[in-house]
Amino acid sequence: MKKFMNTAETMVAESIEGFVRAHEEFVAFGVERKCIRRRHLVPGKVAIISGGGAGHEPMHIGFVGRGMLDAACVGHIFTSPTPSQIVSAIEETDTGAGCLLVVKNYDGDVMNFEIAAEMAAGQHRIEMVLACDDIETVRAGDGRGRRGVAGTVITERLLGAAAERGASLAELKAIGDSLSPRIRSMGVALTGVTVPHTQRPTFTLGSSEIEMGVGIHGEPGYSRQPFANADTIVRRLCEAIVDDIKQATDKGLLLVNGLGGTPPAELYLAYNIVRDFLCEHDLRIERSLVGTYATSLDMQGLSVTLAFLSDEEFSLWDSPISTAALRWGC
Amino acid sequence: MKKFMNTAETMVAESIEGFVRAHEEFVAFGVERKCIRRRHLVPGKVAIISGGGAGHEPMHIGFVGRGMLDAACVGHIFTSPTPSQIVSAIEETDTGAGCLLVVKNYDGDVMNFEIAAEMAAGQHRIEMVLACDDIETVRAGDGRGRRGVAGTVITERLLGAAAERGASLAELKAIGDSLSPRIRSMGVALTGVTVPHTQRPTFTLGSSEIEMGVGIHGEPGYSRQPFANADTIVRRLCEAIVDDIKQATDKGLLLVNGLGGTPPAELYLAYNIVRDFLCEHDLRIERSLVGTYATSLDMQGLSVTLAFLSDEEFSLWDSPISTAALRWGC
């Protein structure tokens, strides 16, 4: 395991410190470094707060700024932030209109965000939206629902844009809940990942194996399959997504996301395959995002996310955004 | 070698097709797909044209658009585009004010861009600027000068911004030449890369070795060293850069660039180390860029680039840009 790191104990703190120093026009540390917050808050705007384990960068810290998140809380690698961190983020960013917590659907994250919401409920109006776009986890049938993976980026962006336009807490909660069945993702890994603290790979793949349906915490997927060409692999992801998604409109947003170790050239090649597949199924893509947005450490792999959006939601997507990872219109 | 690809013969064409489909608001294919060009040219503006082998994405195609390049020509992997491609890009983008060719300093690229410039000279006014920011190649002492690596991003951005503001061809040539001694880069690899056509790694590293001073074509560096912690590795890069660069101002632009297989979290950790080092040397960083901009296929590695710029050049850096890989202010 060769990584650019000093010690497993300090790597998250050092990386986040670098992030804040690199982007101080957008972000700042919160009190006691419990969260990364937007440098300039907008009084009267609902605060959008997210967070999760480290190891998924730029998610969520790279989305803090105008038009997306007001704060992000970062836990240890693949581990939820603590309730105390989340309460601190609420206290720092609620300017009177309440807070919307956007939480990826994992037991630990949901528990800690719920505890924080209860702790802060006396002083703050709080709602929660679950990001649950992964299609693999439903097949597992364990009743815990879908994981939140790269589709979380779309949910957080649309909610952040709506908040910036003045949507109320109740309106934002409704938008978030309505997005859920219209966003679906699936991932594939060519390699497993090694968590620095344990020095053990979460799963190991042979030189001619791939893992279909992986999550972003090194969870194995639903099926180990023989390595194949990109057409074969990517079309399997597309078929599973199109089978599962609720096609509410005929216009999609397509995200091809790298899991950490996959270069842009391969992501664009995969994107091209997805576009061919969607054309064959008479599905139009109105907006695209191709890059490394929700990672699983340095995993070689990618995920495909499709979201069916309304014209109003595309307009939210296009509105000005200034964050480290997404920036346009201002 | 597991990559997302179909065949070695088609991978570049498929990837570029995906790129153009994903970003059609900025870019379009040129005639016969010989180049990727800016969708909306600006009459009377000097055209900025670059190019090089594939395998370095998003360089250069990701920089085509307002405020940077008017066209990029892409060759086979790690292979210069042909003179015919470059001539075609000149013909499509010269709106009367001439063309500036920005060429990374490699024998093949320089030769083909020079041939193209000669072929087009009867009809077009043409100047050329060499990108030569790598410090390793001078140590080699083979007389071919410094390679162009990630610092090329900075050169192309500043020239593109100056052209957008109306600089003449002669002024742009002067800006490009003056930047050269003030931009320096050095890279390190934790793994080699395998070129799909040959199926052979360009060099092989053991599990406890690193390669210092690598280029972006899988060239080995000047020294194989034992794997070490990030502080040790990154500080060695910084020392070499600070020893070599011409410190024209006291304000720097810092680029920490991933070589293809390195996740954002590790790049930010490295960035933090560079900032500490530069603070200790009383060097101020005014602008930062951290991400994957100039790759060597899926190499696990990174490079550090430092550029000393004037206030006027920082203002060019900040001016509006709309490309796939860099976007702000519009």
Image (cartoon, coloured by chain):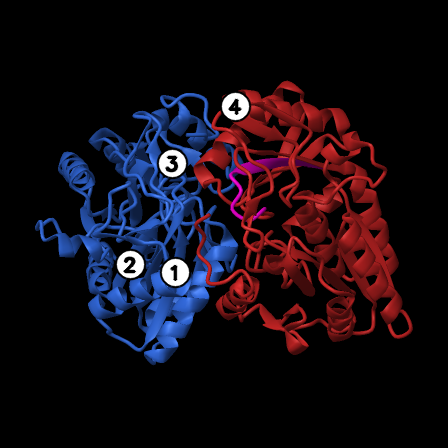
Chain colours: A blue, B red
Q: Which mark is residue B236?
A: none
- Disc 3 versus disc 2: nearer the observer: 2
Looking at the image, residue A70 lies above or below residue A232:
above
Quarter of the image with the C terminus of chain B is bottom right
Label 2 crowd (10 A; few <14 / some 14-19 / many >=20): many
User: The residue tagged with tag 3: helix, strand or loop?
Assistant: strand
- Residue ID at (52%, 23%): B227
* Residue corresponding to mark 2: A185
For disc 4, the chain is B
Magenta range is B296-307
Q: Is residue A255 magenta?
A: no
1 vs 4, front mark: 4
State yes or no: discs 3 and 1 in contact (Cβ < 8 Å): no
State yes or no: discs 2 and 1 in contact (Cβ < 8 Å).
yes
Question: Label 4 belongs to which residue?
Answer: B227
Asked if marks 3 and 2 fall on the same chain, the answer is: yes
Name the mark nearer the viewer: 2 or 4.
4
The kind of secondary structure element at disc 1 is: strand
Which is nearer the N-term, disc 2 or disc 1? 2
Residue B297 in the magenta stretch? The answer is yes
Q: Which residue is mark 1?
A: A255
Structural distance between the alpha carbons of marks 2 and 1:
9 Å
**Label 3 neighbour load within 10 Å: few <14, some 14-19, many 20+:** many
